[in-house]
Image: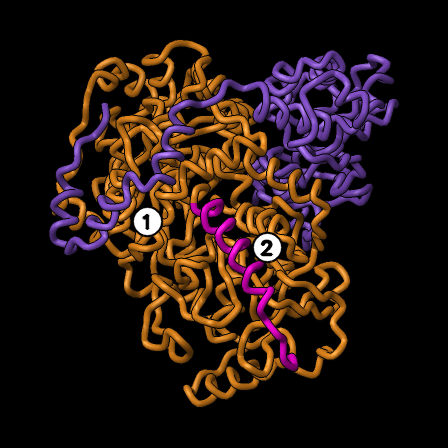
Amino acid sequence: MTYTEEMLKSMQLVAEKRAANAALEPTRMTADEKTNLLATYHPDYRQDKFKTITFGANKGEKAPIELVELLEANARIKAGDVDLEKPFYDVDVLIIGGGGAGSAAAIMADEAGAKVMIATKLRIGDANTMMAEGGIQAADKPNDSPAIHYLDVFGGGHFAAKPELVRKLVYDAPECIKWLSDLGVEFDKAPDGTMITTHGGGTSRKRMHAAKDYSGAEIMRTLRDEVLSRQIPVVDYTAAVELIKDESGAVAGAVLMNMETRELRVARAKTVIMATGGAGRLHYQGFPTSNHYGATADGLILGYRAGAKLFAEDSLQYHPTGAAFPEQIFGALVTEKVRSLGAKLVNVNGDVFQHPLETRDVCASGIIREVDDRKNGIKINDTTSGVWLDTPMIEYKNGEGTIEKRIPAMLRMFGKYGIDIRKEPILVYPTLHYQNGGLEISENGMSTVENLYVAGEAVGGIHGRNRLMGNSLLDIIVFGRNAGVNAAAKAKEVKLGKLTLDHIAAFDKERAEAGVVSDKVSPMLLPTYTHGNPVFEDKKAF
Amino acid sequence: MENMVNIYLYGKQYSVPANLTIMGAMEYAGYTLVRGCGCRNGFCGACATIYRIKGDRELKVCLACQTKVENDMYIATLPFFPLVKQVYDLNKIKPTEAVMMQLYPEIYACIGCNSCTKACTQGLNVMQYIAYAQRGEFEKCAEESFDCVMCGVCSSRCPAGISHPQVALLARRLNGKYLAPECGHLEDRVKEIKDGTFDELLESLMQKPISEMKELYNNREFEK
């Protein structure tokens, strides 16, 4: 890779100071320092990037402009576009989304004897789960307990999470690790079976379980294999474009659209589980994202239009270490595990400027301050600067071979561009990573709309206003399983009434009454990228 | 003026900026990707791609999201490949050589041509992990195949019709479930939670006012 003169000079300083930096134990910030840092530098505090929701269940609350525009946009279909009397699919539990949460839900609902179907707009496994690298938390070691885990989650999320959801998260964690193990997930273990665990940002105990730095991929491919082995129907390249209700107002299915032919089909279901994941591809505030191609907040849009309430919809997570160089992987995730293993954050002068394992919101804000305010970043191009993540420090501390064994995906990702992270530090800058908020659920996984369950990143309330590393892989399993069990049980007692799409017109009426005019349709389904080609300036993919 | 290169998407020529990945170049050229695009970060295997540089005999493979375009690149993507995945109940099979014989007998028809290894977008030693699977050495097969993203290019090149990624996945699940050492502290903790060991403590935490929770949080001890 071609480094600039400035990069090479700075890299030299990083190498010279490595030994001293490795020995350094940077202090953690005080509560007040963190509060001030966040208020000044965290993107969630940039008021001009947010907008008030003008109608619907969360009227009067703030959310990112891009999300509000989609929440208030027009439906893709009209009630008359499909014949609700003739459902093409008729199931007990319809799961929308084929990531980790949807797959875990499907397995449990199937186990409970329900007739289950997964509809997913890409393929099963094309999901943020697949890309989660660092690990999954569970308080299963003798020096740890669910109570300590609870405190880390609740405090790390700024005391804004729903306590009963946090309790479920930490309580079910060990059992979920066992469940995954029994399904054949290969966790990193010592020869005696002890889990090899590390810290994540904001964890007070080493409880990060991992499968190298393919933790999410290992979990996802195992769940997918189990779904397919159980022969649960997976309808791929098929997006949900609208929820269907019955005359009682309970959710009773969805209108599905073939992503390739655009054909519409009706799926009737006694219960629906929304497991559509995150929103990184909305590129809030122009940030790059670590998310997969389909992360466009579809579930939030569909749920909101059907009357479901959102929780903390104004809270996003910017992962401190997105790749900032080379440009081909701009915004890609550099797992927190790199810091768990000992790499420190270093500025242009080769100096460590903060503790590497503060919570993600604090850590990201500190990097933004170092670059934007203190001007201690390394210039990458006219629009981008970053800071060093001193990867060679990992092997300096832990010995040769550590990187290949523990973070092979990182070694490969940079290696493809001629960067050997064992020898050269890498440049990073925060990237849009996670939607802390989402559809509100109660402990049984149901949203505020009858028979609409939610699981995974589409849920709001589990992590408060900041999620800790390793608690997302955990939450998709805990709450995916939970939703599957409860949706299957509920399906047994549901008597479906006549199906309707009346909520579309009702929503249109609310929009008109609020005086909002929108020329947009939602859900977005896929982002549009043209990489600056002027010919396609106004292109819209979907 | 940006530095441009000529590439050929399915044989048709396009001029694209030289700094783009193959996936980016397709989008620059005007393609709307639905298939052949998943995580965009090298983990999902959706964008398996085969290419050849004009004048070069060698056929190369890559992930479109992880590879920069080059001048005179002839590109064909492989957004789907019909891998064979056998259906099984992991609880009812055991990590024996016979399992592979039963579920994926075609691995024993491997002729050792090594085309799979040459075709791996992750640079894995595919033929070696199939050899381990043939011998029932599931732990070795699991380790050797661990970084597989299941893109399927290996299988597209296999004269014996082996679905390598599925064989490896079965080996990894068998290894994870049956061969990896059991974890005592995990079993203990699951039991403690079931027995209600932490119920009172958790309940009291949930009842505490936020001010007290802040106090506890800000003064917690960190494991070194």
x, y percent for residue A116: 66, 56
Residue at point 48% right, 83% down?
A: A517
Task: Tell which of B151 and A160 is nearer to you.
Answer: A160
Q: Secondary structure at mark 1?
A: helix
Task: Tell which of A208 and A44 is nearer to you.
Answer: A208
Task: Tell which of B213 and A502 is nearer to you.
Answer: B213
Q: Secondary structure at mark 2?
A: loop
Q: Colour of chain A?
A: orange
Q: How many marks?
A: 2
Quadrant in which the C terminus of chain A is drawn: bottom right
From the rendered image, report the letter of the chain displayed in purple. Answer: B
Residues at discs 1 and 2 both on one chain: yes
**Measured along the vertical axis of the image, is residue A43 above or below residue A52?**
above
Q: Along the polypeptide, which appears first: circle 1 or circle 2? A: 2
x, y percent for residue B117: 73, 19
Disc 2: which residue = A97
Residue at point 60% right, 58% down?
A: A95
x, y percent for residue A23: 21, 16
Q: Main secondary structure of the magenta part?
A: helix
What whole-number distance in Å separates the C-alpha atoms at marks 1 and 2?
Answer: 25 Å
**Measured along the vertical axis of the image, is residue A48 above or below residue B124?**
below
Classify 10 Å Cα crowding around label 2: few (below 14), some (14-19), many (20 and above): many
Q: Which quadrant of the structure image shows residue A50? A: bottom left
The part of the chain drawn in magenta is A475-499
Q: Chain ID for label 1?
A: A
| A485 is within the stretch colored magenta | yes
Furthest toward the front, the residue is B195
Residue A167 tag number: 1
| A498 is within the stretch colored magenta | yes
Q: Chain ID for label 2?
A: A
Residue at point 76% right, 39% down?
A: B78
